[in-house]
Amino acid sequence: MENPLNDLTGAEWLYWTNSIYPTNFPPDPTHPLRKKHGAIKPPELMAEIISFFTKEGELVLDPFAGVGSTLLGADLVRRKAIGIELNAEWVRIYQEIKATFSVGPEGLVRGKTGRAIESLLLNGDCLEELKKFPAEQVAAIVTDPPYGCSHRVTFTRETNFAMYNPGEAKDFGNAASFATYLEKMAAFGREAYRVLMPRRYLVILIGDRYHNGEYYPLSTKVAEVMQQAGFKWKGMRIWWNQATQRPLRPYAIKRCYVPNITHQNILIFRKG
Ligand SMILES: C[S@@+](CC[C@H](N)C(=O)[O-])C[C@H]1O[C@@H](n2cnc3c(N)ncnc32)[C@H](O)[C@@H]1O
């Protein structure tokens, strides 16, 4: 029977349907550059996700690309990828990575001994840039948007704060409220639905939040918005990277229960 979605064996496919998804990826050689962005994902994780939802050579889109971890993941597994990122500094860092690293047999390597990194990163607002994309050309959308309103990523000491523009209204993370954020995500969902090929997948990595003393199930709210855009919600994986786990913080010990949210949700949607 022909497998229309990916190049995996049946056993690999089965393994990937486990709803609990622990990983243990150590920092890769591009990490010192990428970590200036405080919310990066391991390229190896992105490569695994992309390997499930595409075949070799197909086109992947990341509309909230940051410093390009999804794009690097796509190159690792020989897919094409286009990213969109609002902040010019994150685009500059990706271009530096592209100029300095290549893909060797064991992964990303410093120097040009391996395959060239080919994925493209556009600088702009995804809501504007996506309108220029033709309909039904993208095989998978795999992305990690800002996690709700007033979402400030934690910057490392090396970050130059001047490069971050907290006043940029187009940044989804600067939405004044969760309601405004969800409206922006709805506009994104409609464009995502249009550019995706029929029966293919949108994958969103997103954490839940704790807000005003209550658990705020952001991933569920975002899923409902994607359903309204036409997507079918097919499932969710709970991702936890042991190698970069967040330390437990002493929230309200011996007073009341406050969760340490150490996992992220991987939401999986299908068009049609
Ligand atoms: C969680 S980060 C993505 C990080 C990325 N996965 C990585 O590993 O580098 C979300 C990104 O979305 C970007 N962003 C926010 N609003 C945007 C918009 N309207 N268009 C494009 N990018 C946007 C932010 O600047 C931020 O870099």
Image: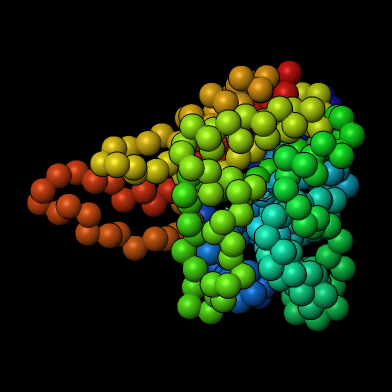
100 to 203, vertically: above or below: below
Query: 88 or 271, which lies in front?
Result: 88
Describe residue 112's horizontal placement relative to residue 199 as left or right: right
85 to 90, vertically: above or below: above
Residue 47 in view (yes/no): no
Specify the quadrant of the image occupied by residue 246: bottom left
Report x, y in % for residue 143.
65, 45
Residue at 14 percent of width and 44 percent of height: 256
Query: 230 or 60, which lies in front?
Result: 230
189 to 253, vertically: above or below: above
Specify the quadrant of the image occupied by residue 267: top right
> How are the colours assigned in the image?
rainbow
Total numbered labels: 0
Find the residue positioned furthest to the left: 254
Q: In which quarter of the image is the C terminus?
A: top right
Report x, y in % for residue 270.
68, 26
Query: 102 or 134, which lies in front?
Result: 134
Q: In which quarter of the image is the N terminus?
A: top right
Specify the quadrant of the image occupied by residue 61: top right
Report x, y in % for residue 46.
66, 52
Query: 226 or 116, which lies in front?
Result: 226
Residue at 26 percent of width and 41 percent of height: 213
Residue at 77 percent of width and 42 percent of height: 128
Describe residue 160's horizontal placement relative to residue 107 as left or right: left
Report x, y in % for residue 262.
39, 52
Describe residue 267's horizontal placement relative to residue 130 as left or right: left
Residue at 58 percent of width and 45 percent of height: 172
Describe residue 231's horizontal placement relative to residue 124 as left or right: left
Residue 192 in view (yes/no): yes
